[in-house]
Image: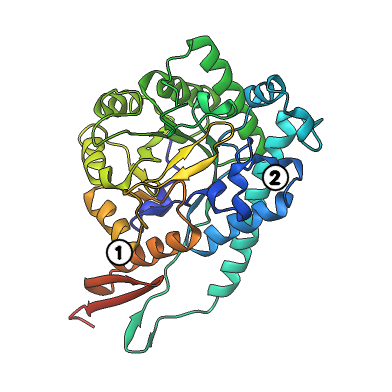
Amino acid sequence: PGSPFDPFLQNGTVVLDGGLSTSLPNGLEDHFLWAHQLLYGMDGGLDVLKKVHREFLDNGADVIGTLTYKFSAETLNAVEKAGLLKDIENNHLTVGELMSRSVGAAVQARDEFWEEYQASVAGSSSGSQDGFVTVPKSRSKPLVFGSCGPFNDNDVFKGATDPNTKGSGDDEESVLRCHYSMKIALLKAAGVDGIAAESLPGKHEAMIAAEEMEKAGVPGWISFCCQDDAHTNNGELLSDCVKAVSSVPAVKAVGMNCFNPKYAESLIQIAKENTDRPIGVYPNSGEIWDARQGERCWHSGTDMKVLTGQDALAFKRAGACLIGGCCRVTPKQIGLFREALDMDSCDVLGNMDQIQQNDGEVLKKQQVASQM
C-alpha cells in the first residue's frame, strides 16, 4: 500500500508541527498530565487545544499530532494510584472518550483550516512583489497523526528526555503489546490518518509498536529519542533500531525526535544508510525537562538552540524529508521551516544564496532562473 506522505513528498518535504504541549499557553505542560488535562475541559479545554493546532497549520504544518502522547489507560491507573484523580474535573470520562475528544479537536482544526485555505487560493496566480518572484505553493490536505509516546511516559512524573526518570523500553512484551494494541485501536477508531510512535528508547519497544500498527492496518512512523550522535536513549545503536523497524510494512517513515539538534545531521546520515524509508527529524530546543514531582521545569544549560529556517534546510540537505520540531519548538519556528523549505524546493527560482533569520522574519536573496 502507498504511504500517506506520498502526495507531500512529490513537492519535496513534509513539514511536521512542533511541540504541542509546550506551545500551549500558561505553562500547561507543568501539570502532572502534561497538558492532557485539556481533554477533561480544564484550563480552557478543547478551544485552547484547537487554537494551537490551528497555529501550526497556519504556519505551514502538513502533519499535526494529537494531544495523546502521554495518555492511555495506564496513565489513568497511575493517576489514581498517586491519589491525584480527585484533582481532575470530569474524571468519569473514559480513555476512549478522551481519545475521541483529542482526535476530534485536531481533525476539526485541520478541516476548518483546509476549507479556508482552499477558499484563499482560489483564483490566485503567480506574480511579482517587491522585486521578488512569488510562486504560490500547492498544498495537500494536512494529516492528523495519533501521538504515541513511550510506555514509560504514560506514568506520571516521568519523561523520555529526563535522565532521572526516562525508561529503557525493556518492559515485558505482553505488557507493551497490550498497551500499543489498545492505544492504536482507540486512535484508529477516533479517526486519525496514521500513528506517530515517538520518543522511543530502543528497538524492543519500537518493534512492538510497529507490529501493532501493522496488525491494526494503520500506517505510521517510528521515531527514536537519541542521547548522542549515534545511540538511542537506552544506549542501542540507532543503525540497528532503524534497520529493524524498516522491515515492517506499516512503517512508512523512520526518524528521530526530542533530541539535541546538534546531533541531527549525524543521526540523519545513520538513518539514511540503514533504511529505504523516508527519514523524519524533529529535534527539541536542546533543553532538558525535569519531570519529577515538585520540579516540573526546563533546564537549558548551554545547549539551548532556537531553530530557524537554516536548520530546516540543513536537515533536508542531510537527507531528511519529514522535518519539524519537538519540545519548545513553536508554531512561529515551524513557519520559518515552511518558508525556507518552500523557497528551496521551488523550481521557478534558481539557487538560494542566503536565508537569514532576523527577529522572526525570513530575508531571502535568490537568483531567478535564467530562463525567466
| Left or right for 99, reference 124 | right
What's the residue at 70%, 45% (across, down)?
Answer: 38
Image position, residue 295 (x, y; %): 54, 37
> Which residue is rendered at x = 59% and y = 61% of the image?
114
Residue 68 location, quadrant? top right
- Disc 1 marks a residue whose amino acid type is Ser
Q: Is residue 188 above or below residue 116?
A: above
Q: Amino acid at mark 2?
A: Leu
Specify whether 111 is left or right of 352: right
Q: Is residue 182 shown above or below 276?
A: above
- Residue ID at (39%, 18%): 204
Q: Which residue is mark 1?
A: 345
User: In this picture, is 75 found above or below 102?
Assistant: above
Q: Residue furthest front?
A: 294
Mark 2 highlights which residue?
38
Left or right of 246, for residue 146: right
Frontmost residue, 323 versus 358: 358
Estimate the x, y position of residue 158 in percent, counting from the top left. Answer: 53, 29
Extreme residue in the bottom direction: 130
Q: Position of residue 310 (x, y in %)?
A: 29, 62
Provide the secondary structure element on which disc 1 rests: helix
- The answer to whether one can see residue 215 in this image is yes
Q: Is residue 110 visible?
A: no
Q: Quadrant of the N terminus?
A: top left
At mark 2, the secondary structure is: helix
- The location of residue 44, given as percent across then percent down, is 73, 52
